[in-house]
Image (cartoon, coloured by chain):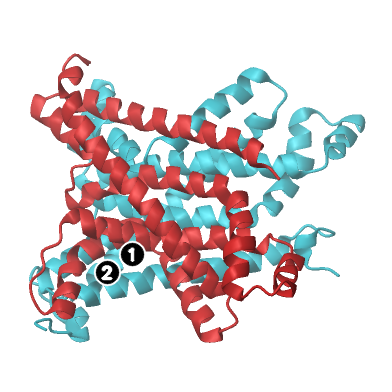
Chain colours: A red, B cyan
Amino acid sequence: MDFSPIPNELPAMWEGMQLTLKMTVLGVLGGVLFGTLLALLRLSHNRLLAGIATGYVNIFRSIPLLLVIIWFYLAVPFVLRWITGADTPVGAFASCLTAFIMFEAAFFCEIVRAGIQSIPRGQVSAAQALGMSYGQSMRLVILPQAFRKMTPLLLQQSIILFQDTSLVYSVGLMDFLNTARSRGDNIGQPHEFLIFAGLVYFLISFAASRLVKHLQKRLAV
Amino acid sequence: MDYNWDWGVFFRETTFEPGEIYLDWFIYGLGWTIAIALVGWAIALLLGSLLGVLRTVPNRWLSGIATVYVEIFRNVPLLVQLFIWYFLIPDLLPEPLQQWYKLDLSPAASAYLSVVICLGLFTAARVCELVRTGIQALPKGQSSTALALGFRLPQIYRQVLLPQAFRIIIPPLTSEFLNIFKNSSVASLIGLMELLAQTRQTAEFTANLFEAFILTTLIYFSLNMSLMLLMRYVEKKVAVPGLIAMGGK
């Protein structure tokens, strides 16, 4: 084992890490946004909308993330051609990000739904009694409290997504893991680079989950 | 609009072997997926239960080992773990074992071995946490009573704590069981021709990308649903009387 070539390759691996982080952050933001929308649909009184959202969540929760990533990678160009009628090149990054957002939304939806349902019903009635519309009571009363309650769970899910972004390896995107692997292969020391990559993932996820635990205690209502 | 939908594609002969249709690929693939998931699950359940018990025993060293195990296996991405088991560990084995792994085993067998060990140990960390929660959810009085009745520690676990803990954690255990089926798809990245790899191959050979992926989505979906229904039935059968989960009024 010889770890000495690693420092030289750090700049390249930092590039990869930036892609990993960008994918994680955008995936979480998009996933939470879309997931909240799905949760509101699932809780709405409109049976059709609630049914569609439930079906969506059930399907995405029962298939592997890797399937979604590969499917979107292969299918997005077709779909775009149907919509726009012309060849619209999208990179692997955009197709992977779409896959992450659509997949994670199903999980975030369930977290948000549980968060909303944990708010006492009396609050909704109180907001209504004060003359608030549905949108106002959600935006000003229910969601701020619900998000506070579910922040630890949302962050936990984000750490899982951070680890899962390594699956973009399957479509050849140069994220942190893939960069480390290809550098290691080029230099002829794949084992050292693989161990290094694993260590970095471990340290980041471990530190982040510690922080989340700490936060959980502070946020406890 | 240059995509030709053709659901008959699954019954067309493959270009590899006469008499073999594309649907056969999906069946082989599903076979591999199930073989990975079930053996991986057996490892996960055994090791996970052992670790879960260790995390709750009144011995710092033993519970410390289990904690370290869980932290390591939960904080390293599954794909990194798979690469470690497939590319790194075989090179560290003693010579005769290395020979056996690299030369005697077929490529599919060595990939299978790696992925089963990887998923088994990966899932064991999750099972461990569930078993621990299940044990800790039981009233403290139970182990004290057993102790007062003269049970020794192994007996308390075997006859009092574990039989109840396992029944409490069946719902989250079910979702881990379903997860291992989904996670088995990473095997496609080390060349094992399980369901996802077969799907990708079909898409490449036939250009009927959407049909292939829709079929696989449906297969995973129905696999998931049927296992969930099965586990819900099991859960009802073995529910601990007197708990809210029983649905009593």
Label 2 amino acid?
Phe
For the residue carrying disc 2, how many other residues have a C-alpha within 10 Å: few (<14), some (14-19), or many (20+)?
many
Q: Secondary structure at mark 2?
A: helix
Tag of residue A61? none
Q: Which mark is residue B26?
A: 2
Q: Residue at x 61, y 39 (%)?
A: A216
- The residue that label 1 is drawn on is B30
| Residue B116 in view, yes or no | no
Q: Are marks 2 and 1 in contact (CB under 8 Å)?
A: yes
* In the depicted structure, whether residue B128 falls above or below residue A128: above
Residue A185 image-quadrant placement: top left
Write the residue at 9% across / 68% down.
B16
Neighbourhood count class around disc 1 (C-alpha, 10 Å): few under 14, some 14–19, many 20 upward: many
Of residue A134 and residue A154, the one placed in the foreground of this image is A134
Amino acid type, mark 1: Leu
**Res B145 visible:** yes
* In-image side of B196 versus A105 (left or right): left
Q: Answer left or right for A101 relative to A147.
A: left
Q: Are marks 2 and 1 on the same chain?
A: yes
The chain containing the residue under callout 1 comes to B
SS at mark 1 in the image: helix
Q: Name the quadrant of the N terminus of chain B.
A: bottom left
Q: Chain of mark 2?
A: B
Q: Position of residue A147 (x, y in %)?
A: 57, 54
Residue B125, horizontal then vertical, whole percent: 51, 38
Residue drawn at x 18%, y 79% as measured from the top left: A83
Report the residue at 78% width, 57% height from top: B240
Q: Answer above or below: position of B197 versus B116.
A: below
Which quarter shows the C terminus of chain B? bottom right
